[in-house]
């Protein structure tokens, strides 16, 4: 929950990608079936920059099932060379309810080719080579990569990097550096 300060603090969340119009839990939203691909690039850049600066990014929507999953799948496809289905399978090992709606799945399928490669090139040009072992860590979540391992909460750590050097004496709210709101085109 993006408003639960204790949970945010416990998980060392420093950045939030909020994928809805407002953080009101009772917001009535009609069915969304499309998000403009430009939102993927904005969100991916934000998440990547957060990670490179040692932060932890919470990606959330109202239910945590479709929209947030879609953005996370797009990000992981860009920072790895895994397919949409491989990424979704890995995410489901730690969040079984993850289930992008059919429109978002179509958007991810369209994004997975040249658009994902273009964003990957953009990240490399802007930030250099990634210091993370994302592909290896995501593959470890897949059934073939999990032989002999148990399904534990520790697997989540492969998706959420630990914050580097969080020795700040500032109160927690001052450590929440930035909040980025990405409103899908279907909500505008």
Image: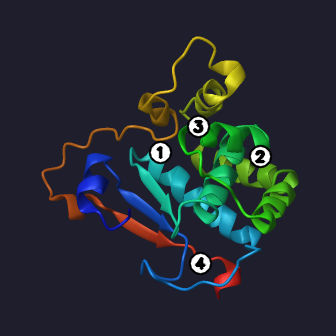
Q: Nearer the viewer, residue 67 or 159?
A: 67
Looking at the picture, does residue 139 appear above or below residue 95? above
Q: Which residue is mark 3?
A: 130
- Label 3 vs 4, first from the N-terminus: 3
Whole-number angstrom distance, CA of label 3 to CA of label 4: 27 Å
Quick one: SS at disc 2?
Answer: helix
Q: Which residue is mark 4?
A: 183
Q: Quadrant of residue 39?
A: bottom right
Of marks 3 and 2, the one in the foreground: 2
**Which residue is at 86% across, 59% downward?**
110
Query: Residue 84 appears at what percent x and percent y?
Result: 77, 46
| Label at residue 175 | none
**Quarter of the image where the N terminus is located:** bottom left
Quick one: SS at disc 1?
Answer: helix
Whole-number angstrom distance, CA of label 3 to CA of label 2: 20 Å
Query: Residue 116 appears at what percent x and percent y?
Result: 78, 52
- Label 2 vs 1, first from the N-terminus: 1
Whole-number angstrom distance, CA of label 4 to CA of label 1: 24 Å
Looking at the picture, does residue 136 appear above or below residue 11? above
Q: Which residue is mark 2?
A: 84
**Which residue is at 76% across, 74% downward?**
33
Whole-number angstrom distance, CA of label 2 to CA of label 1: 23 Å
Whole-number angstrom distance, CA of label 2 to CA of label 4: 22 Å
Of marks 3 and 4, the one in the foreground: 4
Q: Which residue is mark 1?
A: 52
Query: Residue 111 appears at what percent x and percent y?
Result: 81, 58
Q: Nearer the viewer, residue 157 or 143?
A: 143
Circles 3 and 1, Cβ within 8 Å, touching? The answer is: no
Q: Quadrant of residue 104?
A: bottom right
């Amino acid at each position: 929950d993006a408003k639960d300060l204790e949970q945010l603090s416990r998980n060392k969340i420093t950045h939030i990608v909020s994928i809805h119009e407002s953080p009101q839990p009772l917001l009535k939203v009609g069915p969304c079936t499309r998000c403009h691909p430009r939102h993927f690039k904005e969100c991916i850049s934000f998440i990547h920059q957060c990670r490179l600066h040692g932060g932890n990014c919470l990606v959330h929507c109202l239910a945590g099932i479709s929209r947030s999953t879609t953005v996370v799948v797009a990000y992981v496809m860009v920072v790895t060379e895994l397919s949409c289905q491989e990424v979704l399978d890995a995410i489901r090992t730690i969040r079984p309810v993850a289930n992008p709606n059919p429109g978002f799945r179509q958007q991810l399928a369209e994004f997975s080719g040249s658009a994902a490669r273009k964003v990957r090139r953009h990240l490399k040009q802007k930030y250099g080579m990634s210091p993370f072992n994302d592909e290896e860590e995501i593959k470890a979540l897949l059934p073939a990569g999990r032989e002999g391992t148990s399904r534990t909460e520790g697997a989540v750590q492969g998706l959420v990097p630990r914050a580097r050097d969080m020795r700040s004496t500032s109160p927690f709210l001052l450590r929440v550096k930035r909040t980025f709101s990405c409103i899908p085109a279907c909500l505008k």
